[in-house]
Amino acid sequence: MLKSFTCFRIQEGWQAPDFHALSDALARTAFRPCGPTERRTSGWVPPRGVEHGPMLESVGGQWLMTLMSESRQLPASAVRAELDLRLDAVEAQIGRRPRGKAKREMKEQVEHELMPRAFTRKSAVTVWIDPRSRMLVLGTPSAKAADLIVAELLTVFEDRLPLTPIHTAQSPAGAMAAWLTSRQAPAGFSIDLECELRQADDSRATVKYTRHTLDTDEVVQHLQHGKTPAYLAMTWADRVSFVLTDELKIKRLKFLDVEAAAAPGAASDGEDDSFDANAALATGELSQLMGDLLDALGGERPPALAAVV
């Protein structure tokens, strides 16, 4: 389910690879579970969730993939407890407690031995490419997770995927502050009942509003005294609600008043496979939302002014 996302722009001049060749490349790096001593594995799985299905789907010209990751969760407390027992045993035997390199090596040994017994956790992330507009959407707001997904994509695309983070003429924080101060949302949007304001100085003082009207003098005063918006809840065209962050990430995405408005990767209902309808809805709505949002932020900065990933 696509509940949040991060966008990148693919640079001009990029030539989309052959669809079937890309599907084959994804299949060659298919997901496999963690081995007994592996901390993490990742790979591609069929977006429809159908076993042995294709790794790449095209719906209305939009390309959809799903990256699955599995990690072993080894509690730090368990490692410390076992390590302390071994350190105590060595101290009792030789009269001193191992430190420095010896202690680090013992800790690594403990982790290696405990790893096969660690619990595993899986997570799936939707990857959406619009070849026409050269937009890449990753279903995560986390910069760390996005970096890992981009690394997987570069492997599949053989490093031929020139990405640029999307930067706008007006910063999201500056724009959100202007909307709150003027008490006027940009055209096509409305401001909802949630935001967070942070002081820019070292104090990092924070004020959060939840289920609270933001059309107040108090909010304006916080902004005038140096606080800036970290995030703001909004609704686009009465059709999609979301939270915009100061890093241009979209969180808590929700489609409104649309039956079965699921994002790519939603499960089928019996034999009625709603994947295509859900994918068409999500990509269609979100393409329009992002276009209007970028316009509200003054448009994109020229690629030459943005760092290349």
Image (tube, rainbow, N blue to C red):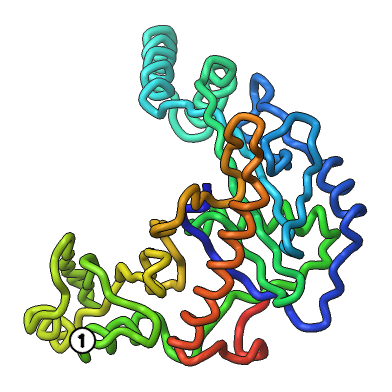
Residue at figure coordinates x 54%, y 67% from the top left: 285
Residue 102 appears in the rendering: no
Residue at figure coordinates x 55%, y 55% from the top left: 139
Q: Position of residue 149 (x, y in %)?
A: 65, 53
Task: Decide if residue 86 is on the left or right side of residue 271.
Answer: left
Q: Position of residue 51 (x, y in %)?
A: 75, 29
How many numbered discs? 1
Residue 309, quarter of the rendered image: bottom right
Q: Position of residue 111 (x, y in %)?
A: 53, 24
Residue at figure coordinates x 67%, y 36% from the top left: 49
- 114, above or below 63, in the image: above
Q: State the residue position of label 1.
A: 183
Task: Decide if residue 173 is on the left or right side of residue 53.
Answer: left
Mark 1: which amino acid?
Answer: Arg
Residue at figure coordinates x 22%, y 72% from the top left: 197
Task: Decide if residue 63 is on the left or right side of residue 126.
Answer: right
Label 1 crowd (10 A; few <14 / some 14-19 / many >=20):
some
Residue 171, quarter of the rendered image: bottom left
Q: Position of residue 188 (x, y in %)?
A: 40, 82
Of residues 62 and 276, the one nearer the viewer is 276
Of residues 18 and 289, the one nearer the viewer is 289
Query: Tag 1's secondary structure?
Result: loop
Task: Decide if residue 248 is on the left or right side of residue 116.
Answer: left
- 153, above or below 36, in the image: below
- 45, above or below 86, in the image: below
